[in-house]
Image (cartoon, grey):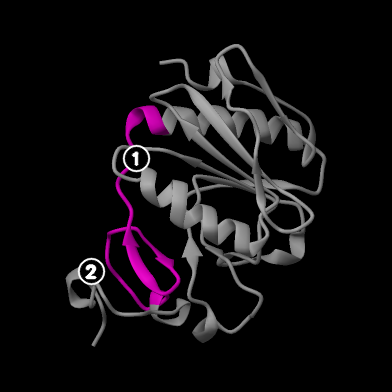
Amino acid sequence: MPITSLDQLDPNGSYTYADYLLWKFEERVELLRGKIRKMAAPSMKHQRTVTRFTRDIANALWKTPCQVFVAPFDVRLTRTREDKDVVTVVQPDLCVICNPSKLDARGCNGTPDLIIEILSPGNSRIEMKDKFELYQEAGVLEYWIANPTEKMIQVFRLNEQGHYIGLPPSVEGDILTTPIIPNLGVDVTEVFVD
């Protein structure tokens, strides 16, 4: 029987990417360690922030091997190619992938170099804790959490021991840079203009 409604699934069940590929409902969901997480529709402020980040990053990546992708875009945080073994599928607001071998027709199979999540009401705990742990374990080199309400970006950079080190928050007036994209300079004030 095809799954055409989120209500047909056990909210406490455990699922894989193979299951995820069979679902035919409108809601956007992610799998975090096999558990379903329903995604909220983004607000206008959220979309504006995504667009500004995308513009800056895409311009900085011009004529480099790295590419930026915007949700909805499946990122399978895995080291396997078997769909039945994948239990984490996320749709980051933005991600940068510099290794083209991680890309396939269904998205990214592996770890992006940079992930940016933009906080919205109701998703802060998930972004701050659950995804922080997932991205750190997967080896995402940098994880940025953008907070449009506070007009602040928190950057976590992976150290040699595989743990995130938090950098001082970037706020209005700051220019945010990263060694992943050497010619990128994100004007924090511009990212959060209303």
Q: Mark 1 falls on what kind of element?
A: loop
- Relative to the observer, which residue lies in front, 16 or 54? 16
Of labels 1 and 2, earlier in sequence is 2
Total marks placed = 2
Q: Is residue 41 magenta?
A: yes
Which residue carries the number 1 mark? 42
Report whether 78 appears left or right of 184.
left
Write the residue at 61% across / 63% down: 137
Q: Which residues are magenta?
A: 20-46
- On the question of residue 91 being in view, the answer is no
Which residue carries the number 2 mark? 6
Q: Mark 2 falls on what kind of element?
A: helix
Residue 27 placement (x, y as % from top left): 28, 59
Task: Answer above or below: position of 115 versus 31.
Answer: above
| Quadrant of the drawing holding the N terminus | bottom left
- On the question of residue 101 being in view, the answer is yes
Residue 169 placement (x, y as % from top left): 58, 27
Write the residue at 39% across / 80% down: 19
Task: Answer above or below: position of 57 versus 107.
Answer: above
Report whether 15 appears left or right of 95.
left
Specify the amino acid type for callout 1.
Pro
